[in-house]
Amino acid sequence: MSVLYSRHFLLKSFSLRLIKKVHVDYHPFHEKEITKGVWDFYDKCLSNKFRKTNPNCEVKLTLNEVGKPPEVIIEFEDGRKLHYDDASYLTAVNIMEQIRLKKRKIKHFYRTSGKEFYDSDDEDEWTRKIAAQEAASAAAASKGKGKK
């Protein structure tokens, strides 16, 4: 379960922009509960919808030895890495949320340092829409409490 974003929002707005490499390492005969999230994330990275967002992103899968937990390594274009040594029981949404947070840090760094970078308007548009919806629902909830 995502802490900051809804599952629907992350699945709709996820992209491979600013990502250079995605490396997934897992054993296919582990229990399904252990590797399901890693496999789902890998599957999403290979889907046409997300591949179109960055066709230069290298998505790689290697099979590891029995007993070794699944591992996910995401390398960003600026050299930063997001590395899960043990990605057991993580969901695809958890991984996408961490990628989104890391991208926000990278974008903030570029903006504050004055460097040029490719930014997508659709990611920011989704962020604005979700923020507006959450603000509206919070306002409706606070009005409902005030009437009692």
Image (cartoon, rainbow, N blue to C red):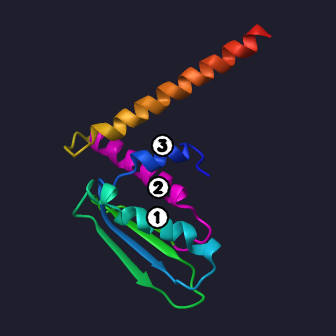
Q: What segment is highlighted magenta in the picture?
A: 85-112
Indicate the quadrant where residue 128 lies: top left
Disc 3: which residue: 9
Mark 2–mark 1 CB contact (< 8 Å): yes
Q: Quadrant of the C terminus?
A: top right
Which one is earlier in the sequence, the residue at label 2 or at label 1? 1
Reply above or below: 26 against 110: below
In the picture, measured across the screen, residue 67 lies left or right of residue 43, that is right
In the picture, measured across the screen, residue 45 lies left or right of residue 52, that is right
In the picture, measured across the screen, residue 44 lies left or right of residue 118, that is right
Query: x and y percent of residue 71 in the render?
Result: 50, 75
Seen at 39% across and 65% down, the residue is: 74
Is most of the magenta stretch helix, strand or loop?
Answer: helix
Which one is earlier in the sequence, the residue at label 2 or at label 3? 3
Can residue 118 be seen here? The reply is: yes
* Residue at the limit of the structure toward the front, as seen here: 48
Mark 1–mark 3 CB contact (< 8 Å): no
Query: x and y percent of residue 90 in the render?
Result: 58, 64
Label 2: state its secondary structure. Answer: helix
Mark 2–mark 3 CB contact (< 8 Å): no
Residue nearest the observer in this picture, 148 or 84: 148
Reply above or below: 78 against 64: above
Is 38 colored magenta in this rendering?
A: no
Measure the alpha-carbon separation of dots 2 and 1.
Answer: 8 Å
Residue nearest the observer in this picture, 117 or 49: 49
Label 3: state its secondary structure. Answer: helix
Seen at 60% across and 82% down, the residue is: 30
Disc 2: which residue: 96
Query: x and y percent of residue 68 in the render?
Result: 57, 85
Disc 1: which residue: 41
